[in-house]
Amino acid sequence: MPADKAGNNIIFACKYYYIHTLMEELGSNSGSSSSSTYENQDVTADEIIRTHTTILENVFHVTLQQKDKHLPQLYWIPKLHKTPYKARFIAGSSSCTTTKRIYKLITECLKLVKSHCTSHCKTFLERTGFNCMWIINNSMDVIRWRKSNFRLIMRLLGIFLHFIQAFHMPNLNINWVSTP
């Protein structure tokens, strides 16, 4: 299995330990369910899928294809950056699931909201010179902004460190900071 935050590393775990960790997360190892996240259900997977399918068709007018009629699986990957090691639990599936179509609809709705906000903020920026849009698409947006505003960042860092030195830590040596 892959390791959390180290995708190129492969971890080997014995089957018993893997299943034991899942059962502990679900609260199935003890006599009573100690987990407040999961509850035992008396319905089958087919009944859950039928219920989801009916609700999606009747309420959201979404018809599921047969390949989408699956429930996600629970699995875990180790967090090797934690001491002691811990588990990151993930519920997912590549052909998931009865809710996949509704997630796509929600994503499209959120994209429309973002598009509207971006347009509004662009107009606000043109009229006032103030950028109130703080949504980034990827890390390249941050890198470009950092490069174009390096002098401003260094000036703000210098002001911040002078403030810290003056009011909180008078013995702090900040001579390495230059404020252009």
Image (cartoon, grey):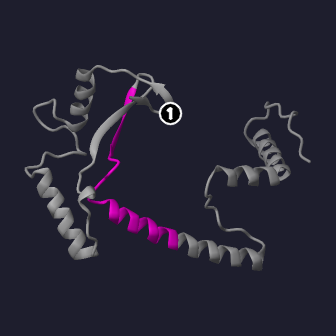
Query: Percent position (x, y) of residue 101?
Result: 33, 64
Q: Is residue 6 visible?
A: yes
Q: Nearer the viewer, residue 174 or 87?
A: 87
Query: Percent position (x, y) of residue 44?
Result: 10, 51
The mark tally for this picture is 1
Q: Which residues are magenta?
A: 86-112
Query: Percent position (x, y) of residue 113?
Result: 51, 73
**Quadrant that contains the N terminus:** top left
- Answer whether residue 83 is magenta in the image: no
Decide: is 152 above or below 14.
Answer: below
Give the residue at mark 1: 5
Q: Say few, some or many: other residues with alpha carbon within 10 Å of mark 1 (under 14 / 14 to 19 / 20 or more).
A: few
The secondary structure type at the circle numbered 1 is: loop
Q: Is residue 141 left or right of residue 156?
A: left
Query: Percent position (x, y) of residue 179?
Result: 89, 45
Could you tell me the amino acid type at mark 1?
Answer: Lys
